[in-house]
Amino acid sequence: MTTSIKLYGSKAERFEQIKAALTEQLGYEPSNPEVVGLLMASFDEDDVTWSRRHEGGSAEPRPSRDVRRHHIH
C-alpha cells in the first residue's frame, strides 16, 4: 500500500521546521518518509492534546512523546 501527500503553504513550512529540528536531534537529515514515520510513532491516540495555534481555529495534534525514542527506518 502506498499513500502520497502534498503540503502547501504553512503546512509545508511547518513540515520543514519539524524536519530541521529532527535533523539537529538525530545528527543527520532524515528522509521525508522517515520524518512522517517519526511523527506517526510519536502519536498516541489515547493521549492526544490539541492546540489552537493557527488562525481560523484549526486544531492540530501535539505529539505526546519525544520522537527520538521512536526511530523508524
Image (spheres, helix red, strand yellow):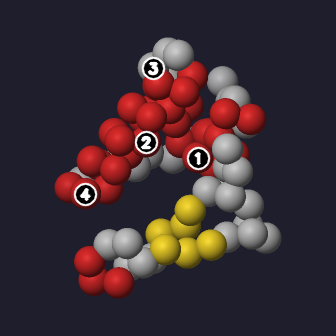
Instruction: Return the disc, 1 or 3, that comes first in the chain's sequence.
Output: 3
Q: Residue at position x 61%, y 56% from top? A: 63
Q: Left of 6 or right of it: where is 3? A: right
- The residue that label 2 is drawn on is 18
Give the distance between the C-alpha atoms of the residues marked 4 and 3, in whole angstroms: 21 Å
Q: Earlier in the sequence, mark 2 or mark 3?
A: 2
Q: Secondary structure at mark 1?
A: helix
Q: Identify residue type, mark 3.
A: Glu
Residue 65: image location, x then y, percent: 70, 51
Q: Quadrant of residue 71?
A: top right
Query: Residue 28 at what x, y percent from top left?
Result: 50, 15
In the rendered structure, the answer to whether residue 56 lies left or right of residue 49 reads left
Question: Element under label 3?
Answer: loop
- Residue holding disc 4: 10
> Which of the two labelled residues, at mark 4 and mark 3, occupies the earlier sequence position?
4
Q: Amino acid at mark 1?
A: Leu
